[in-house]
Image (cartoon, grey):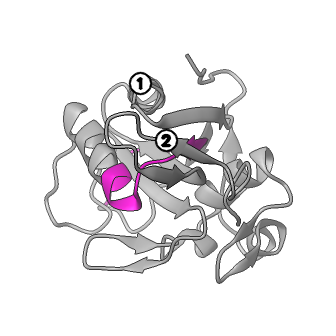
Amino acid sequence: MTETPNPHIVDTDTLTGEMHPVRRCVVSIGSNLGERLSNLQGAVNALADTPEVWVTSVSRVYETAPVGAPEGSKDFLNAVILADTTLSARTLLERALAIEDAYGRERTGEVGAPRTLDVDLIAVGDRRANEADLVLPHPRAHERAFVLAPWHELEPDAELLDAGPLAELLEKTRDQELRVRDDVGLSVQ
């Protein structure tokens, strides 16, 4: 994955005069509580309303069984958003967490707990991070069909940094059940 559209193009912050590179970011969204589709559309809208974030495309909606969730958890609706941004990965993460909070996300600490909205940074340009709350690229993206399939739909030739081409990674996850929901969709404002 490389920065897009061109790593040499920069956007000037008109208040500080600082130069910031434009980076392509991949964001995975999911919901299995409440009005799932509305929650996903709200995440798309909130990202599109974020200064210095330009949503360029949104995948179709996929439905998947929850991974590692408590017994009786509902299926997830998932999608991937591609955007260009001049925001730092840290600022983008803070925005993702704020969007989750706005949709009533409760952090119980339970692995795989049901959630109204999950907004995960998968990749931010070629940025690598290994901090307690920010790991880039996302450490489990390469093994999750619900991330790989929608991303591959939008960028068939993309590669996940340090993991390889999406097509090859997706092939390794073909045992994971994934249903395209052609009866519903998300739109970019």
* Mark 1–mark 2 distance (CA, rounded to whole Å): 19 Å
> What residue is at 60 percent from the left and 20 percent from the top?
187
The first of marks 1 and 2 along the sequence is 2
Nearest-to-viewer mark from 1 and 2: 2
The residue to which callout 1 is attached is: 49
x%, y% of residue 81? 58, 41
Q: What element carries label 2?
A: strand
x%, y% of residue 178? 66, 52
Q: Which amino acid does label 1 sit on?
A: Asp
Which residues, given as a range, are shown in magenta? 71-93
- How many callouts does the rendering have? 2
Q: Is residue 34 left or right of residue 27?
A: left
Q: Is residue 108 positioned above or below 117 on the image?
A: below
Q: Is residue 69 positioned above or below 119 on the image?
A: below
Q: Can residue 181 be seen in this view?
A: yes
The residue to which callout 2 is attached is: 12
x%, y% of residue 149? 71, 54
108 vs 187, nearest the viewer: 187
> What residue is at 66 percent from the left and 34 percent from the top?
56
- Picture quadrant of residue 143: bottom right
Q: Is residue 33 positioned above or below 28 on the image?
A: above
76 vs 42, nearest the viewer: 42
Where's the N terminus, which quadrant?
bottom right
Q: Is residue 22 left or right of residue 41?
A: right
Q: What element carries label 1?
A: loop
Q: Does the magenta stretch include residue 189?
A: no
